[in-house]
Image (cartoon, grey):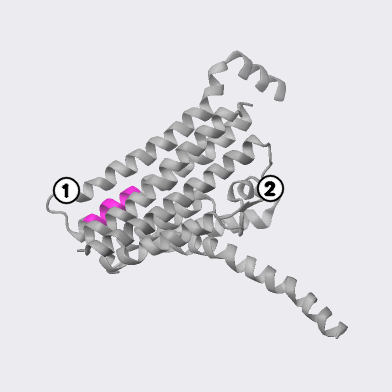
Amino acid sequence: MKERFKRLIERNRWLKAAPNSLTLCNSLCGFAAILFTLRAYERGMMPDTGAEIFAASAWIILFAMVFDALDGFAARIFNAASMHGVQMDSLADMVTFGVAPATVVAIMTHSLRELSRTQEIVVYLLCSVYLGCAALRLATYNVHAILNKKSGDKFTGLPSPGGAAAICSVVMFAEHTSIDIARLALVLPAYAAVLGLLMVSNIPYLHFGKWLLSIRRNRKRLLLLIVMLLIILLFQANGLLLLVTLYIFSGPAAYLFHLIHRSEPSEADGKGAA
């Protein structure tokens, strides 16, 4: 079976272009999300209508994650992994999971609130923190790829798709509930800045892509995945926000627990020595 598949790839060289094509679709989704977000400046735009536009942009960004996951899978299947593909993947992620979410937050805050000049500058600075940290994280990933450093089962720092998912889940939650989206628009830039700082931190995060690939050999993980899908199907935006938020805060919580747990024996040894 494997030999037949190898011969199929050799006869159809165009299959090796599939990973880069999927990566290109990822970047086009990010561009589409930015263009769609700009519709918030159309005349007669009201907060209720604006929420729908920002939620649609969030959906586009989340949909891009499908292409982001498939391009790596296709590269492995068709044996088409290359440094060109790695660089292209990071560039696409920068557009879709860096520029697009920052644009959504900035325009959402600016279009739904009357801001003073100082507030406007603060909002743009906070969004710039998210964008800058996403760029630093992706650049670090490229350097590791050039140095042939293999990634393990965990990321160092929050992955950029995770940061984008956190922003998108909040935006979609606001659109599906009666929450005052104008007030939320003031909090979201600060949340985006925190997500950016988590991206460049040393806090370990679960590699969700590799976790998904391992579910075939682990029934407990398969059951957990089914439960997560049921939560999203039953509670929709609320369920998505819950799961993404748990993922975001699982890293710092586990990191603090590890630090406390690691410091306990040393404290005990110090007391014993005294």
Name the residue at the left extreme.
44
Separation of residues labelled 1 and 2 (CA atoms): 46 Å
Among the two numbered marks 1 and 2 on one chain, the one whose residue lies closer to the N terminus? 1
Is residue 8 in view from this perspective? yes
Which stretch appears magenta?
A: 50-57
Name the residue at the top extreme.
11
Is residue 1 in view from this perspective? no
Q: Which mark is residue 121?
A: none
Number of numbered callouts drawn: 2
Q: Which residue is mark 1?
A: 42
Q: Nearer the viewer, residue 102 or 72?
A: 102
Position of 226 with respect to 239 (left or right) is: right
Name the residue at the right extreme.
273
SS at badge 2? loop
The quadrant of the picture occupied by the N terminus is top right
Q: Residue at x 44, y 52 (%)?
A: 164
Callout 1 amino acid: Glu
Q: Position of residue 20 (x, y in %)?
A: 50, 28
- Relative to 41, residue 272 above or below: below
Callout 2 amino acid: Gly
Q: Nearer the viewer, residue 79 or 256?
A: 256
Residue 238 figure quarter: bottom left
Q: Which mark is residue 152?
A: 2
For disc 2, the neighbor class at 10 Å (few under 14, some 14 to 19, many from 20) is few
